[in-house]
Amino acid sequence: LETKDKSLKKNTEILLKMLNKDERKVIQALIENHGKALQAEITRLPEMSKVKSHRVVQKLIDRGVLQKEEFGKTNKIKFAPEIQEGMF
């Protein structure tokens, strides 16, 4: 169990090193919220506007890191299944 925790932490650190500052903020927010967050919540992060959050999230979706599903007037953002399995 302890080695699994260490490997998960290492996987997370490797993932974060490959991202820019804004992408890191989004991923960190998702990690803190157990892999899910509303895009409106991401918009409220420090130094993050609606346009910037949309662009960052879309870039991560295009790379296959995140998935987006409609949720009322906003979107629910979550990790792609492969990433979710490796992190939690």
Image: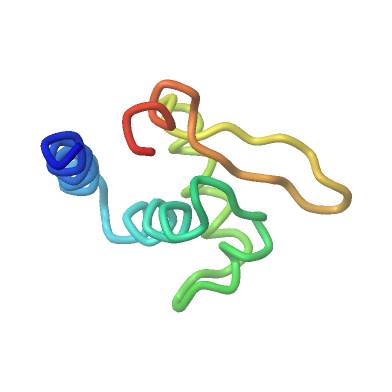
Does residue 44 appear left or right of residue 9 in this picture? right
Point out residue 3 in the picture as x, y percentages from the top left corner: 11, 36
Give the residue at x 60% y 59%. 51
Give the residue at x 17% y 47%. 13
Does residue 57 appear left or right of residue 68 in this picture? left
Query: What is the residue that sits farthest to the bottom in this orientation?
Result: 46
Instruction: Work out which quarter of the rendered image holds the C terminus and state it.
Output: top left
Up-down relation of residue 54 to residue 7 (above or below) = below
Query: What is the residue that sits farthest to the right in this orientation?
Result: 72
Does residue 44 appear left or right of residue 48 in this picture? right
Instruction: Work out which quarter of the rendered image holds the N terminus and state it.
Output: top left
Q: Nearer the viewer, residue 86 or 18?
A: 86
Up-down relation of residue 68 to residue 46 (above or below) = above
Query: What is the residue that sits farthest to the front in this orientation?
Result: 1
The image quadrant of residue 70 is: top right
Point out residue 67 in the picture as x, y percentages from the top left corner: 57, 32
Point out residue 46 in the picture as x, y percentages from the top left corner: 46, 78
Q: How is the image coloured?
A: rainbow
The image quadrant of residue 85 is: top left
Give the residue at x 49% y 36%. 79
Q: How many marks?
A: 0
Point out residue 57 in the picture as x, y percentages from the top left corner: 52, 45
Give the residue at x 38% y 61%. 25
